[in-house]
Amino acid sequence: MPKFQFKIVTGANEDACKTKYDKLAIETSEGSGVYVHDPYTFYLFDQGGVGYLGDTPLFGGDASKFNMLSSNKTLSELKPGSFYFVTSNITITDASNPSDPIEAKAGTIWITDNNTPLGISELSWSSFTTYMARYIAASAVKASNIPDSTYIGNETSIMTSAAVKKLIDENINAQKILGITFFKDVRLVTLTQQDIDSDSANSNANPYVTFIIGEDEETHDPITATAPINYAVDHVGDIGLVFQVQVGPEYDESKNDGDKWIFINLHGLIDIYIGGTSYTTTTTVSNDPNGASHTKQILVEVNKSQETRANFVQNIRTAINSISEGNTYNPAAVGGNNYSNNKFITESQLAEILAYLLTDFVQYNSDEIIVSVPDPMEEEE
């Protein structure tokens, strides 16, 4: 079944909102030239208080009853018998008592009513949904009803007030549209072993991360907060964000009235690199001195032999003599010079070693190179 949704249409004035609203219409079929709005969307202008349910003017000549408030006001500036949707934390001052202004929080709804002592009162969400149902029924709904959740609507029947109330309560509230749930604060945290073990008494059924959110204004002691974590998937060292979520229709930041913190683990989005030594290389990870603070510099170094050229030459000569006498030679064995099998010899090292070794087999003159290879038969004689 389609869900109702609210869409706030913004603009410099009512005409600008109307222009933007017209552009939100969708062509029924390609090339048809017929444009309609989503019949399950409540379009509310933030200028002029105009409201549409799809293409149907929802408020008509009574549109001025619905208004947005985002800045401080006095009661004399507000229209009687009107609703005000508060979008920022503001104050409403009564000229007869200016020293005690009304604190109106973002996300609340107020109604100007001469029957109340202050001339204005905050409206609960349940009262607002009931009023909306009655208002829609009086303005646009004439007959018929919605029998159950399988009802999809048609072109001949119109919803009753009870049906509208049902849709508002079950569909709109289910999407938290009327609850105005939103994130109030965001902080970065890193999970510790203490966080993971925070509910060990109950086999970690309800672990939580603990963090500092400020200090007490009177005692200046740190104020801590907690957010639930998942023992099965969250780990020590995981980095995440905690969001303070406003819940409930009567939010007061000075009270613990049900608002809560939610932890979002970011370890799936973050790769942590640790340098180590492999069989033939050494890897080092460090902060990149030429990059941003979050970039890393990865350095891979080959394990270069530290043996001197003289030792190599002498050991190779000894090995050659040993083999020529019919013995075996294992360079990795202690008796075979205990050479490592995970270090490399560079080109320059190899050239230097060969140059000295070949002096045993090569004679040089100015015209040509004469290679003299010892005759094993001569050595036997």
Image (cartoon, rainbow, N blue to C red):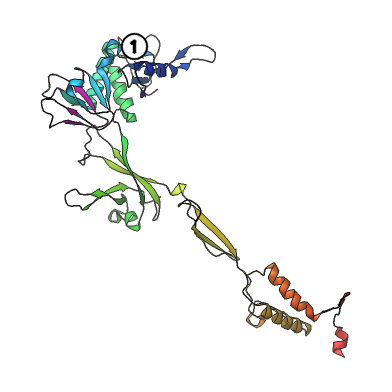
Q: The disc labelled 1 sits on which kind of residue?
A: Ile
Q: Position of residue 349 (x, y in %)?
A: 69, 71
Q: Position of residue 256 (x, y in %)?
A: 21, 42
Is residue 93 within the magenta segment?
yes
Q: Quadrant of residue 56?
A: top left
Q: Main secondary structure of the magenta part?
A: loop
Up/down of 83 relative to 176, above or below:
above
Q: Residue furthest bottom?
A: 381
Please state if 219 lies on the left or on the right of 226 as rendered.
Answer: left
Please state if 142 lies on the left or on the right of 218 as rendered.
Answer: right
**Residue situated in front as seen by the camera: 341 or 161:** 341
Q: Secondary structure at mark 1?
A: loop
Q: Residue furthest front?
A: 366
Q: Position of residue 95 (x, y in %)?
A: 13, 25
Q: Position of residue 140 (x, y in %)?
A: 31, 11
Up/down of 250 relative to 158, above or below:
below
**Residue situated in front as seen by the camera: 364 or 328:** 364
Is residue 320 within the magenta segment?
no
Residues drawn in magenta: 92-119
**Which residue is located at x 10 percent, y 25 percent?**
96
Up/down of 113 relative to 223, above or below:
above
Res 128 seen here: yes
Mark 1 packing: few (<14 Cα in 10 Å), some, or many (20+)? Answer: some
Task: Quickly name the residue at label 1.
Answer: 158
Please state if 375 lies on the left or on the right of 208 as rendered.
Answer: right
